[in-house]
Every structure is written in structure tokens, then in C-alpha cells.
Image: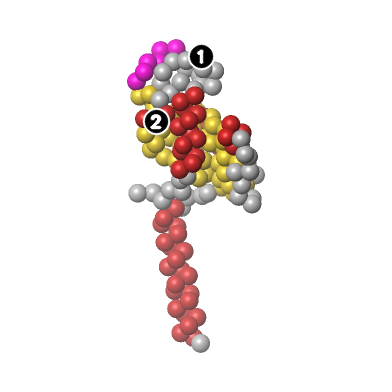
Amino acid sequence: MPLTISNRSTEADVRSWLNNNGFVGKTAKFEELELHAIQRPGWVQVFRFCARVKYHPLDNNNLETDGDVTADWQELFGVALDDERERKQNMKTQIWVFNDPVEQKEKLNLISNDFLICKKGQNGELFGTVLFLLVVVSVAILLLSWFQ
């Protein structure tokens, strides 16, 4: 299982946005909700998410569809930009959703251009990289204590 850095308040914000934009947010099933990038000193955070949601057609301009969407489950790829300094809820979190992960990646690259990006290891797992670094540090400490 991949190591994820998620945020319950961001999940609640995404669910609320989904409800306000023609989806059934309370039944959304998040397959991923991970911290993607952070802007120093940490107030502004960018999350990426993938969720399965039910769509209920509304007069909705935020998501382009091909017109044959029913109330069935559909997979959405999204980006949430969260600014903890904002007091008003409607200004605190901005959300974009896409039908295609390529569009999601483009948006992530655009808005997190000057941010600190959470990178994954070579095999795609952050956990493996962290474990490797812990082993290296432990061996270094052991060698230093042995030579003194």
C-alpha cells in the first residue's frame, strides 16, 4: 500500500464542492487523495485526487461532458489548491476536476510550478525511498560510533 499524506478537511472540501457541482459528494469513493506540492512556508498546499462519484446533471459549466452522462458512477481526476490563510470557506479551497488523468497532470504542473513537489521513489513508492534513507543513516551512525 502506498504511503499517502491525506487531509480530512480537504476531503470534506472536495465532497462539498462535488455536491455543489452536480455530483453526489457524500457517496464519493476516493481512490487517491495525496499531497502533491506545498508552497513555503506551508500555508498553500496542492492535493491530487481520484474519486468515483455519481453525477447528477445540472447546469454545470465546471466540467465538460459529451452530453450522454447518466447518474452512473464515473471516475474523476482532480486537483485541490488549499490556502490555510483564507478565512472564507469558498476562498480557502479551489477545486478542478477532469475526466482524464493527463489533464489533471497538466493542471498540477501549472499551479505547482514554483512549489515544493512531493516526489516518489524510482519504483513509484515513497515508502521504499524513506526506508532506504533510514537504513543508510542507521549504518552511518553505527560506523561513526564504532570508530570513536
Q: Position of residue 19 (x, y in %)?
A: 46, 26
Q: How many marks?
A: 2
- Figure check: 37 above or below 18: below
- Figure check: 1 above or below 59: below
| Amino acid type of the residue that numbered disc 2 sits on in the rendered structure | Lys
Q: Which label number is shown at residue 26?
A: 2
> In the shown orientation, is residue 125 left or right of residue 47?
left
> In the shown orientation, is residue 110 left or right of residue 120?
right
Of the pair 47 and 66, the residue shown nearer to us: 47
Residue ID at (43%, 23%):
23
Q: Determine whether the residue tagged by mark 1 lies in a helix, strand or loop.
A: loop
> In the shown orientation, is residue 140 left or right of residue 40?
left
Q: Which label number is shown at residue 125?
A: none
- Figure check: 1 above or below 10: below
Q: Is residue 77 magenta?
A: no
- Figure check: 88 above or below 22: below
Magenta stretch: give its range.
Answer: 67-72
Of the pair 35 and 122, the residue shown nearer to us: 35
Dominant secondary structure, magenta: loop
| Amino acid type of the residue that numbered disc 1 sits on in the rendered structure | Asp
Q: Is residue 109 visible?
A: no
Sequence-first tag of 2 and 1: 2
Residue ID at (44%, 15%):
57
Q: Determine whether the residue tagged by mark 2 lies in a helix, strand or loop.
A: helix
Q: Which label number is shown at residue 59?
A: 1
Of the pair 105 and 19, the residue shown nearer to us: 19
